[in-house]
Amino acid sequence: MENIQENAAPLKRPAELECDVVRFQNQKDKWIAFVGLKDGRPYEIFTGLADDEMGIALPKSVVKGKIIKTTTEDGQKRYDFQFVNTRGFKTTVEGLSYKFDREFWNYARLISGVLRYGMPIDQVVKMISGLQMDNDSINSWTTGVARVLKRYIPGESEEITPPDLP
C-alpha cells in the first residue's frame, strides 16, 4: 500500500505567491477573487464582495499582484495583497484575510486546502459546482468561484471580465 503522505503536496506555503485578481458578477452581487498561484497553478483562493464597506475595492486595472503571508510581532498570521499601481509604486492591502465575510473565508480555506494538495482543477470545479447551499448569496458565490477556477483548466477559454466596464 502506498504511503499517502509521500504523494501529498508540500505543506510549506511560500512567503509570497503570484496572484491573479479576477472580478465577477452573479445576480446583483459583484465579487473579487485573489487566486494565489504556485508554479502557474491555483494554490489558494480568497474571495468576497468587491466593495469598500463589505469587502475590498481595487482599481479595475489591477489584475495581478502577490499574496504575502505575514506574521505580526505578536505571532498572528495574516495574508496581504500587494500590487504595483499605474505609477509603478507598490501598494499593499493589509489583512486580506480579514476583509471578507467569515463564512466565505471558511469555504475559501476549504477550497484552498483541496487546491494545495493537487486535486485536478476540473475536479475542484465539479466539487464546488455540486455544493448545495441554502443561502442565495453563498450559491452566487460558489457559482462564481467555479467559473474563476474553470479558467485554469487546460483547454478552457472562458474568460471572466470585470463587471460594468466603461
Image (cartoon, grey):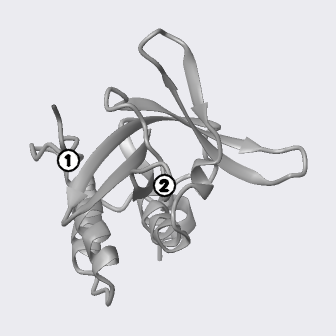
Residue in the foreground of this view, choosing between 158 and 154: 158
Work out whether mark 1 precedes mark 2 in sequence or the reverse, and give the earlier one.
Answer: 2
Query: For the view shown, which residue lies furthest in the right direction?
Result: 74
Q: Residues within 10 Å of mark 2 (few under 14, many from 20)?
A: some
Residue at 27% over, 76% down:
139
Instruction: From the image, tell me which residue sits under label 1.
Output: 151
Residue in the foreground of this view, choosing between 124 and 162: 162
Which secondary structure, mark 1? loop
Indicate the position of residue 104 as horizontal and vertical percent values: 46, 69
Callout 1, which amino acid?
A: Arg
Instruction: From the image, tell me which residue sits under label 2.
Output: 55
The residue mark sitting in front, 1 or 2, is 2
Q: Residues within 10 Å of mark 1 (few under 14, many from 20)?
A: some
Is 150 left, or right, of 41 in this rendering?
left
C-alpha distance separating marks 1 and 2 = 23 Å
Is 106 left, or right, of 154 in this rendering?
right
Which secondary structure, mark 2? loop
Residue 91: which disc? none
